[in-house]
Image: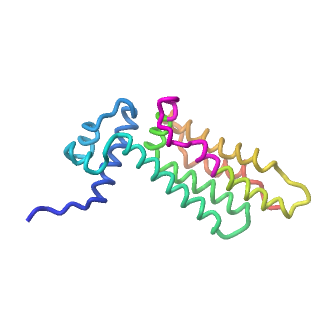
Amino acid sequence: MPRQVDREARREQILGAAVRVFARQGYAASRIEDIAREAGVAKGSVYLSFGSREELLRAAFDGLADRSGALLAEVGRHPGGPAERLAFLVRSAMELLEGERDLARVLLDVWSAGARRPAWIDMAGFYREYRAVVAGLLEERDAHAAAPAVAPSAHATVLVGAIEGCVLQWLFDPEVELGPLVEPLVTLLVPPRA
């Protein structure tokens, strides 16, 4: 009797291999053969699961977007006031990114390709969503204060930029660990309750 292959598990195996290969070799230099070898499958299996390198890249990006969207939705359900939810967002976003080092490298590689990057990778939209959630939490917090402590949209941009700056240092410098940077970010960038 032929062995049954769990198609979803095979897709995840191939996708994980693709992200590792893209991170190690760069997206432009990676070939389907490299991905198949990394996944331990035949080249045809890659094409059965994903039609192209770009489809693999898109699946990886969509997976991160889904995980980020779930995180942003969870922020709204998190108990506590706006400051507690904002601290939860910072901690959770950093934890998510820490588990996605290879994918973060791939996105940086693809983003740096400029005009050659796929049009469907909308990093501006990705950041816009995070900034909107942060600004909303800051506005909610400041609604009860005599005067706003910060300009919500500017503060949101600084907070997202600080997270990204930490991630870039973590990607470039093997001596930088992301985990220990979480609490300093929370202390510096999450305004205390009024």
Within the magenta stretch, is there residue 123? Answer: yes
* Residue 58 on image: x %, y %: 42, 46
* Residue 12 on image: x %, y %: 33, 54
Within the magenta stretch, is there residue 188? Answer: no
Q: Along the horizontal axis of the image, is 66 left or right of 192?
A: left
Q: Residue at x 63, y 57 (%)?
A: 89
Q: Along the horizontal axis of the image, is 42 left or right of 170?
A: left
In the foreground, 145 or 135: 135
* Residue 137 on image: x %, y %: 73, 59
Q: How is the image coloured?
A: rainbow
Q: Along the horizontal axis of the image, is 77 left or right of 147?
A: left
Query: Residue most toward the right?
Result: 146
Q: Residue at x 8, y 65 (%)?
A: 1
| Above or below 178: residue 6 | below
* Residue 93 on image: x %, y %: 57, 53
In the foreground, 180 or 63: 63
Q: Which residues are magenta?
A: 111-129
Image quarter of residue 123: top right
Query: Residue most toward the left?
Result: 1
Q: Residue at x 48, y 51 (%)?
A: 64
Q: Residue at x 54, y 61 (%)?
A: 70
In the foreground, 86 or 48: 48
Image quarter of the C terminus: bottom right
